[in-house]
Image (spheres, rainbow, N blue to C red):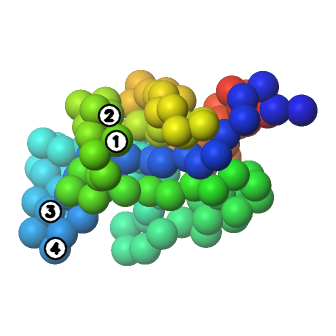
Amino acid sequence: MRLMVIDKLVGIYNANGSVIGELKYLFGKLTGQSDCALCDITHGPFRGKADFRDAQQALDIPFENLHLDELEPDLQSFRNHAPCIVAICDSQYSLLVSSAELARCRGDANQLFEVIKAKVL
């Protein structure tokens, strides 16, 4: 039995998704000026992590990841919380996983999904 009935989860990266945005993030990451704990969980050096994709599919809740420049108006208020995960329930948006909680996962998708499950299942 779920504690919360979640219609959808949205992960918000602390980066823009355009080519220029991705390059700026990569440069910032290499120089220690940019950080995104959600990026560390979902992506390796060159591509997405299989353990994240597998856990995402097994969760049985639609889960989408968006960059800052891809946010719809209802998600704009979470921009300053990025990276984070937002839960959408009956058209209500709420912060489910904070940037601090993402950072504590240390790039481990399994830890992230344990946090999510503890809050929604």
- Report the residue marked by disc 1: 75
Q: Tell me the amino acid under the disc marked 1.
A: Leu
Q: Amino acid at mark 4?
A: Val
Q: Secondary structure at mark 4?
A: helix
Residue 36 lies in what quarter of the image? top left
Badge 4 density bin: few <14, some 14–19, many ≥20, Cα 10 Å:
few
Is residue 105 visible in the rendered structure shown here?
Answer: no
Taking 33 as reference, is 42 left or right? right
Q: Earlier in the sequence, mark 3 or mark 2?
A: 3
Image point 69% across, 56% down: which residue?
55
Could you tell me residue 39's position as x and y percent? 38, 53
Q: Amino acid at mark 2?
A: Phe
Q: Nearer the viewer, mark 4 or mark 1?
A: 1
Whole-percent x and y of residue 42? 48, 57
Q: CA distance from mark 3 to mark 2?
A: 19 Å
- The quarter in which the C terminus is drawn is top right
Label drawn at residue 78: 2
- Residue position for label 4: 19
Question: CB of mark 1 within 8 Å of CB of mark 2?
Answer: yes
Residue at the disc numbered 3: 21
| Disc 2/disc 4 C-alpha distance (Å) | 22 Å
- Seen at 48% across and 48% down, the residue is 10
Q: At label 3, which amino acid type do we have?
A: Gly
Against 55, residue 101 (above or below) is above
The local secondary structure at tag 2 comes to: helix
Q: Secondary structure at mark 3?
A: helix
Q: Given this view, does label 3 or label 2 mark the residue nearer the observer?
A: 2
Give how far apart the Cα atoms at labels 4 and 3 are.
Answer: 5 Å
Is disc 1 placed on a helix, strand or loop?
helix
How far apart are the alpha carbons under marks 4 and 1? 22 Å
- Do the numbered discs 4 and 1 sit on residues whose CB atoms are within 8 Å? no
Q: Nearer the viewer, mark 1 or mark 3?
A: 1
